[in-house]
Amino acid sequence: MRHIFRATSMLVVTVGVLAYGSYLITGRLPWQGISFKNQPDIGLPEMPSLPKIKAARQLVYKWKDADDIWQFSSEPPADDLPYEQLEINPDANTIESVSIASEEQAPVKPDIKIPSEANGNGMDLPYLPRGVKKLMEDARSVQKALNERAENQEETVDNL
């Protein structure tokens, strides 16, 4: 059984290598030149274009109830509450457009003020030179503590 599997695997790999080598030399796969003249055309059929159906506009009523909550319905409120009649166009774009600043309008630079030393609670900000120095010192002390811990663990294991 193992010999059959190995022989089959070797045959598949050999065919693949030969086909790829042929492709590298000629630029075509070996079976690309074969034509099947007697084969029927099995392509997908042409799909007829479907008529565009326009959705009907819909009337919606909007009002505030006694609890001052907005209500929407396809029928006006039963009470004598003031309501607004809205007509919804299903073909309209429901996403509001974004206005793009023209070339005449200069882009506004954000007014960012970076405090010179501290952020108010006595802690240095990490992007200031003093904060970066403190950050590096803290990283070195953590590395030193981790190295000491690793050495203690190695000594404990050696003493077992």
Image (cartoon, rainbow, N blue to C red):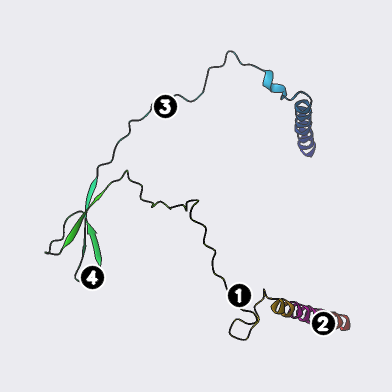
Secondary structure beneath dot 1 equals loop
- Residue 15 colored in magenta in the image: no
Quarter of the picture holding the N terminus? top right
Task: Give the label on residue 47, or none.
Answer: 3
- Left or right placement of residue 91 versus residue 79 in this view: right
User: Label 4: how many residues lie within 10 Å, few (<14), some (14-19) or many (20+)?
Assistant: few
Q: Amino acid at mark 4?
A: Asp
Judged by depth in the image, the label closer to the viewer, 3 or 4, is: 4
Q: Are marks 3 and 4 in contact (CB under 8 Å)?
A: no
Number of disc labels: 4
User: Label 1: how many residues lie within 10 Å, few (<14), some (14-19) or many (20+)?
Assistant: few
Dot 4 corresponds to which residue? 68
- Residue 139 location, x and y as percent? 75, 77
Whether residue 32 is situated above or below residue 79 in the rendered picture: above
Q: Amino acid at mark 3?
A: Met
Task: Give the label on residue 138, or none.
Answer: none
| Sequence-first disc among 4 and 1 | 4
Judged by depth in the image, the label closer to the viewer, 2 or 4, is: 4
- Residue 130 location, x and y as percent? 71, 79
Task: Give the label on residue 114, or none.
Answer: 1
Q: Residue at x 64, y 83 (%)?
A: 123
| Sequence-first disc among 3 and 4 | 3
- Left or right placement of residue 51 versus residue 30 in this view: left
Q: Which residues are magenta?
A: 136-149
Task: Give the label on residue 148, or none.
Answer: 2
| Sequence-first disc among 2 and 4 | 4
Q: Are marks 4 and 1 in contact (CB under 8 Å)?
A: no
Whether residue 51 is situated above or below residue 149 in the rendered picture: above
Q: Amino acid at mark 1?
A: Ile
CA–CA distance between discs 4 and 1? Answer: 45 Å
- Residue 148 colored in magenta in the image: yes
Secondary structure beneath dot 4 equals loop
